[in-house]
Amino acid sequence: MKLRDRIGIDLRRHIRIEDGVEWAAKNEVRFLDIQLDTAANAVTSFDAKRAAAVRSVREKHDIHIGLHTSSAVNVAEYAPHASEGVDAYLKAYIDVYPQLGAEWIVVHAGYHFTSDRDVRMKAGLERLKRIADYAEKKKVRLLLENLNKEPADAEVHYLAHTLEEWRYYWGLLSSPAVRLSFTANHAHLVPEGVRGFAEAVDFSMVGEVRIADCHRNGHEVHLKPGAGDLDFGEMFRLAEGKGFKGHYTSAFGTLDDMLAARDVLVEHARTAGVNVD
């Protein structure tokens, strides 16, 4: 498959999944990522009839879809009742996965409040182990994403935003249900950078690479390619050079921005010596 065809788009939560699939087919986009948390796409809105309709249109146009859980739902939660709600939330995504014909679910490690980092990490890992067991039984593929850093003086910080923290969860990869989602722009925000992450990661364990522009060691923003200073040519060279064969997911701007950027991204890769054909 040509590189351009492997560059998908994050629909986020702003378009009905049925409409998104039709839009993707019209614009020759093969991979879609979507969140099922709000409005018309809330996970609770998919009864058997609607789920079957989504699966039918997806199969008709040969579109690959993945689901993206919200990073606002704290996977590292340990408070009674709230903790049980997080389990139910993640299981709901897993349960709807086969009904929609989805092929991956992006999950996160949660977040901490500075002083409780270690206990949060432990709670999150224990939850992800339980969820991985559930996903394995359901034949569902989870992709654990490296998240973004927050300002140093913020009280709340995402877990798995540094290479060290992300590695803490890699024991989960012993489950066939768990692989990684590598977000290049998040890696660009921390000292290790894209190169440090790429050199440390076994790309046979990476299910997708997520892309947006931002500024080196800066703050979390999702900019169009060229609006920041991420070297997309190097990013493609590193990922493809380590044997990555999966899809890329653009997550910035509008749908039209992401659509137009595919050719720009391919040209960056070609200029860097990557085989785009």
Image (cartoon, rainbow, N blue to C red):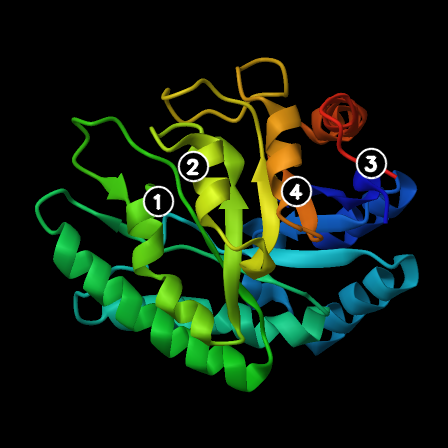
Where residue 262 sits in the image (x, y, percent)?
A: 77, 30
In the image, residue 227 sits, relative to residue 157, either above or below, namely above
Left or right, 180 with reference to 76: right
The amino acid type, in three-letter code, at marker 2 is: Gly
Residue at mark 1:
163
Choose mark 2 or mark 1, whichever is in front.
2
Q: Is residue 103 left or right of residue 75?
A: right
**Label 2 secondary element:** helix
Q: Mark 2 = which residue?
A: 196
Secondary element type, mark 4: helix
CA distance for labels 3 and 4: 12 Å
Asked if one can make out residue 82 in the rendered structure from this viewpoint, the answer is: no
Give the secondary structure at mark 1.
helix
Q: Residue at x 17, y 71 (%)?
A: 80
Q: CA distance from mark 1 to mark 3?
A: 28 Å
- Disc on res. 276: 3
- Name the residue beneath numbered marker 4: 241
Q: Position of residue 57 (x, y in %)?
A: 85, 61
For badge 1, the amino acid type reads Leu
Is residue 4 something that shows in the picture?
yes
**Image quadrant occupied by the C terminus:** top right
Foreground: 12 or 107? 107
Give the vertical position of 43 relative to 228 (above or below).
below
Q: Disc 3 or disc 4, which is closer to the eye?
A: 4
Hey, what amino acid is under mark 4? Answer: Gly
